[in-house]
């Protein structure tokens, strides 16, 4: 049996939601406050950072990666110390990365680490040229210096 009294009052009772705090947020403009650190899960390991001055381009990170998520690409930002120094540097494909941290563990210079101070901002357009893809992937992350998680940094080798 249809409850006409209840149905006719339903639009009025819905008005109470106008004064309730919404559960959705306009991420990343607004932070999620569901975790004890704003915006990120306490167990989130973070995104990779690579100190280009320390990285020697050995490719160990790419070799150990179980997801085949690391490509070694020529970097314009690298100033080789001598003519034998490698100018390739790792680029991570986050469509493949499973955040295991093995690349961080194996890095002999400790240049590769993970940081929680980055957030994924949007999905890039897929490039038709595989050469252009690494650049697109790198630009897909923005650094949030306002979010410092010094008491719970990203994954680093112990
Ligand atoms: S393992 Fe470390 S030093 Fe070697 S290429 Fe990767 S980031 Fe650079
Ligand atoms: S965290 Fe794991 S899956 Fe991701 S790039 Fe490093 S080794 Fe590969």
Image (tube, rainbow, N blue to C red):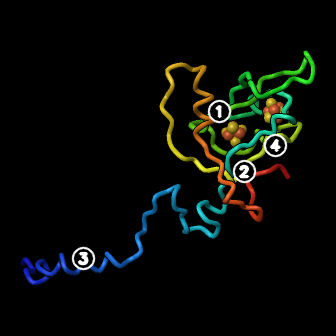
Between the residue at mark 4 and the residue at mark 1, the CA separation in whole angstroms equals 15 Å
Residue marked by disc 1: 69
Q: Earlier in the sequence, mark 2 or mark 3?
A: 3
Residue at image position (61%, 43%) is 141
Please name whichever residue, 2 or 128, is drawn nearer the observer in this view of the structure: 128
Location of the N terminus (image quadrant)? bottom left
Q: Is residue 128 above or below residue 55?
A: above
Contact (Cβ within 8 Å) of mark 2 with mark 3: no
Residue at position x 59%, y 67% in the image: 35
- Look at 81% across and 34% down and name the residue there: 52
Task: State which tag comes first along the sequence, 2 or 4.
Answer: 4
- Choose the circle earlier in sequence order: 4 or 1: 1
**Precedes in sequence: disc 4 or disc 3:** 3
Q: Which residue is mark 3?
A: 14
Q: Is residue 29 above or below residue 130?
A: below
Q: Is mark 1 within 8 Å of ligand 2?
A: yes
- Foreground: disc 2 or disc 4: 2
């Amino acid at each position: 049996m249809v409850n006409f009294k209840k149905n006719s009052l339903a639009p009025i009772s819905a008005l109470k939601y106008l004064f309730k705090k919404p559960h959705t947020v306009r991420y990343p403009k607004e932070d999620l406050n569901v975790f004890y650190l704003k915006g990120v899960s306490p167990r989130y390991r973070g995104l990779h950072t690579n100190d280009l001055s320390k990285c020697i381009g050995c490719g160990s990170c790419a070799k150990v990666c179980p997801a085949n998520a690391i490509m070694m690409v020529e970097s314009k930002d690298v100033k080789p110390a001598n003519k034998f120094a490698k100018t390739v540097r790792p680029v991570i494909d986050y469509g493949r990365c499973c955040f295991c941290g093995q690349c961080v563990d194996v890095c002999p210079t400790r240049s590769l680490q993970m940081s929680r101070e980055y957030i994924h901002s949007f999905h890039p357009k897929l490039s038709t040229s595989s050469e252009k893809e690494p650049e697109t992937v790198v630009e897909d992350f923005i650094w949030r210096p306002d979010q410092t998680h010094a008491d719970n940094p990203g994954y680093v080798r112990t």
